[in-house]
Amino acid sequence: MTEGKRLPGPWGRDVRFDRVAILAEGSFDVEGAKTAVGVIRYGRCRTVAVIDSQNAGRTAKDVIGVGEHVPVVASLQEALAFDPQTLVIGIAPRGGLLPAEWRQVILNALEAGLDVISGLHAFLSDDPEIAFVAERHRCVVADIRRPPDALPVAEGLCRSLPEQTVLTVGTDCCVGKMSVSLELTLGARRRGIAADFVATGQTGIMIWGRGISVDACVADFIAGAAERMVLEACRESDWVFVEGQGSLYHPGYSGVTMGLLHGTAPKQMVLCHQVSRPEIRGYGIPIPPLNEVVAYHEAVCAPLFPTKVTAIALNTYDLSPAEARRAIGEAEDLTGLPADDCVRNGPDRLLDAVLSAANVPTS
Amino acid sequence: MTEGKRLPGPWGRDVRFDRVAILAEGSFDVEGAKTAVGVIRYGRCRTVAVIDSQNAGRTAKDVIGVGEHVPVVASLQEALAFDPQTLVIGIAPRGGLLPAEWRQVILNALEAGLDVISGLHAFLSDDPEIAFVAERHRCVVADIRRPPDALPVAEGLCRSLPEQTVLTVGTDCCVGKMSVSLELTLGARRRGIAADFVATGQTGIMIWGRGISVDACVADFIAGAAERMVLEACRESDWVFVEGQGSLYHPGYSGVTMGLLHGTAPKQMVLCHQVSRPEIRGYGIPIPPLNEVVAYHEAVCAPLFPTKVTAIALNTYDLSPAEARRAIGEAEDLTGLPADDCVRNGPDRLLDAVLSAANVPTS
């Protein structure tokens, strides 16, 4: 087995992260397997196989549009032929519990000598049987969402940072906040800007190799965890792009969003929206027009610090090119802000907007 | 030892709760010992002594204005003379850690056969030495802030409840939200209204005997925990008064406040403010004028559900009667809403306002 990349963290020893197989049984599609899509698209590890018997025989690109060399296989047994070091749990279900039928697959992976990386709320390494089998086979079970000990209460320090901090906010969960923050970070680096990404969720942590899943922190420490990460990132970088979480409009997750907003006190926000989604998914709450969403986010922050939405990041993955162009134009007309789909078209237009807002020349 | 009241909960067996001693060494004052003040003022248990060597020889009433029959003593040893069953940790420090010098006092209490109730973030029952000593002496260590297992993600159900739900919100932490919610609940019950109190913090839980400390939940479940409690309370009650937490203006705790707001989706909010406090304590962030605070809270909720601030609850504990009267008048002029200090003057004026807003006759 190759030795190489490792994912450091609070799980005993670093987990091997060169060659991973992703478990996404029954859920491997763009909407259901957010973690799998993120790791295949942006991960620094090599995904050697995806496990999903419903799509076995196809490639990841056939199913989700990225990963043309990633085979989808029917079982862990078949995935082992591609010599993975690590099994990544590729879904992030609501509530974060382990689907019962995946338990045996995880035990089999450990018995085959694989490490396991999970972003579930239910920590696998707290499961006595999983922990026992991991120990016996000297494998690591890394619960990416487990927060570090002794987090601080936020002190409001990010409000006075000289660095440019940019937080992605969204009209709902799963609209592309992580991808947009990553695209902006990578785009800025390509221009020679000292930029860093702050991962605040399990997929972001798997991709970037560090971070804290703020939605898994004890509630009093959401903002404190975010603040700590931003302060650390600012030591080395002039621009810090923070992965947003949830939505201020989401009845379940708005607390996490608010804590992240106040903890990071961003200089700018980039508003993310999936064009084909009129409502908060699963709640039937209509998403207001984007100009109202912009004003709402600025008004929520105003008593604590000045900030602006400076760009609109649209997710048009399920639209035709013509529909996407029209949606982008409509968003620009409605908000008066630059808009684009940076996964479809690259981050340059949004990055120009963000840099211009901070008076950085863009050409 | 008397057998009687018990505090049920997820800590093994119920904890005895008839006769308690409160540990507040070095912190027994109105601002520093919120838990002690709340338990003495509203608790259904009898507080037999408060431990604080700085104030030994006085009564609780001398120090905090309530508890004329509660002696303050210099040590646990002296408190034992008053035959307590249980030691209550009477402070709720920022960050929730155990002051190092209190550790031995807790061990000594367990060795003397006392149960221990703690509202700290650092769970005492996870401490191997404390757990071992408790076990050996067959005592219970109840970590009131430990959340129940398997909390749900909020489903937005409180938005369509027919019952009247009233949440206290505040301009800062520690301004009186719990006390106001309790006063309104007790006042409504005195008028024969089926009213319940929903405890969302450690002191409220100690007083009411049940509840969930939402600030100690995993962040994704803040709103879900609040929603579950409100739905349960509505089964038996027409009016539900929910204890608020933190403040939307608080850089450290606003996530908890937002989650509570969206999880409970209150029909009405009662805004709590300490008149002598111009800034968020410890952050130097000015508190806006109360009319702006009212508008801000209504605007934050508007995209999800309609709600109004219907009364202003002022905390005037450190003002003279004349100053308090003036402050109440000024708040009414500024907001156009009924205002009062219901700890000083009783809850009737605020309760009338809340009932009237729901078209319930008040006389």
Image (cartoon, coloured by chain):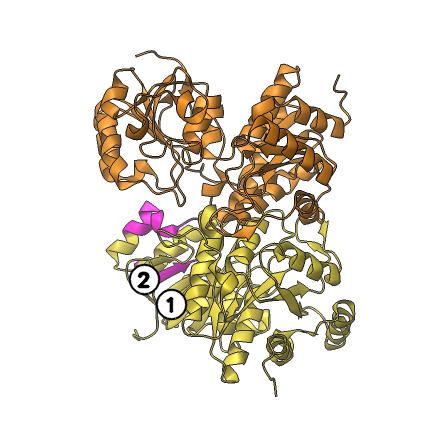
Chain colours: A yellow, B orange
On residue A68, which mark appears?
Answer: none
Q: Which residues are magenta?
A: A111-132
Whether residue B236 is visible, yes or no, is no
A129 in magenta: yes
Residue B19 in the image: state x and y as whole percent: 36, 17
> Is disc 1 surrounded by few (<14), some (14 to 19) or many (20+) residues within 10 Å?
some
Relative depth, front residue between A342 and A229: A229
Relative depth, front residue between A320 and B293: B293
Residue B82 in the image: state x and y as whole percent: 29, 15
What chain is tagged by disc 1? A
Three-letter code, disc 1: Leu
Three-letter code, disc 2: Ala
Residue at x-position 52% and y-position 61%: A159
Residue A216, above or below A189: above
On residue A112, which mark appears?
Answer: 2
Image side of residue A342 versus residue B361, left or right: left
What quarter of the picture does the N terminus of chain B occupy? Answer: top left
On residue A80, which mark appears?
Answer: 1
Image side of residue A288 versus residue B74, left or right: right
What quarter of the picture does the C terminus of chain B occupy? Answer: top right
Relative depth, front residue between A128 and B280: B280
Residue at x-position 68% and y-position 24%: B349
Badge 2 element: loop
Badge 1 element: helix
